[in-house]
């Protein structure tokens, strides 16, 4: 089953974590303090990055797809970036950018 991925830029990570935790009725799976958070629910794979200068902007879209052979990126006709990846590939990318993030492999 593919899970829609949405990546947003936010002004204040802590406020956004509280807000999206309530909206999604789920705790973030991953938090890189002051930088990044990720939720994985049955419907959505949502990431937020603290980027005050870009707050309120869509960073990119994508699909978590268990059949993806590798992490790929394409741009649609309107310029939106779409990623396609497995949960394991996403974990590897997150830990590459945020090595201090606590992202247990058991959550794949």
Image (cartoon, rainbow, N blue to C red):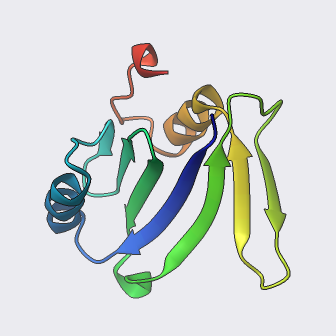
Image quadrant where residue 2 sits:
top right
- Image quadrant for the N terminus? top right
Q: Residue at x 22, y 60 (%)?
A: 23
Q: Residue at x 38, y 41 (%)?
A: 41
Percent position of residue 46, x then y: 43, 54
Image quadrant where residue 34 sits:
bottom left
Left or right relative to 59: residue 16: left
- From the viewer's perspective, is residue 76 above or below residue 62? below
Percent position of residue 57, x then y: 47, 82
- From the viewer's perspective, is residue 26 above or below residue 16? above
Percent position of residue 84, x then y: 72, 47
Percent position of residue 68, x then y: 78, 34
Count the labels in the image: 0
Residue furthest to the top = 106
Q: Residue at x 28, y 77 (%)?
A: 11
Left or right relative to 96: residue 27: left
Q: Residue at x 53, y 46 (%)?
A: 97
Left or right relative to 98: residue 25: left
Image quadrant where residue 48 sits:
bottom left
Left or right relative to 52: residue 85: right
């Amino acid at each position: 089953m593919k899970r829609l991925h949405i990546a947003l830029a936010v002004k204040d990570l802590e406020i956004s974590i509280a807000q999206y935790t309530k909206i999604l009725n789920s705790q973030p799976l991953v938090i890189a303090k002051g930088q990044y958070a990720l939720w994985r629910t049955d419907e959505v794979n949502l990431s937020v990055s603290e980027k005050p200068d870009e707050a309120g902007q869509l960073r990119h879209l994508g699909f978590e797809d268990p059949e993806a052979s590798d992490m790929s990126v394409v741009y649609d006709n309107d310029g939106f970036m779409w990623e396609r990846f497995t949960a394991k590939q996403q974990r590897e990318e997150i830990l590459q950018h945020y090595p201090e993030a606590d992202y247990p492999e058991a959550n794949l």
